[in-house]
Image (cartoon, helix red, strand yellow):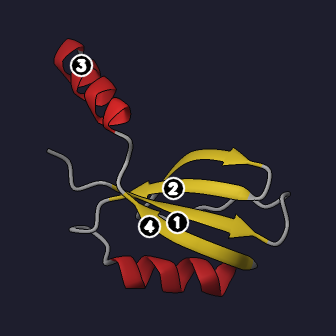
Amino acid sequence: VTNERELVVDLRDADIAVSDPDAISISQDGARVRIGYDPQKVATPDLIARITARYPVADLTVENPPIEQIVARLYKEMDG
């Protein structure tokens, strides 16, 4: 079981790289950016406040990571 969540951010400009010290960049497809974070290490509202203060955000959602991603990470940790 993982605590990880994904913040999906739709930016107004596709040429911006989003980063935060408490989050990990997962992917960027045009103006849509996915960043992963642990809500036990950084509160979701705090992370959203920092991202929206620093970047031109058009929309955002919070999601659980896909089960395939969780399983792949577990296998990687067992092999590593």
Nearer the N terminus, badge 1 or badge 2?
1
Residue 26 is situated, as x and y percent measured from the top left of the image, at 53, 45
Residue 80 lies in what quarter of the image? top left
Is 57 situated left or right of 46 in this image?
right
Quadrant into which the N terminus falls? top left
| Marks 1 and 2 in Cβ contact (< 8 Å) | yes
Please tell me the numbered disc located at residue 20. Answer: 1
Nearer to us of marks 4 and 1 is 4
One can see residue 60 in this view = yes
Residue 55, can we see it?
Answer: no
Mark sitting on residue 62: 4
- Contact, CB < 8 Å: mark 3 with mark 2? no
As shown in the figure, which amino acid type bears the numbered disc 2? Answer: Ile
Give the mark nearer the N terminus: 3 vs 2: 2
Mark 2 Cα shell of 10 Å, populated few (<14), some (14-19), many (≥20) = many
Q: What element carries label 2?
A: strand
Residue position marked by numbered label 3 in the rendering: 75
**Which residue, given by chain and number where applicable, does mark 2 sit on?**
35
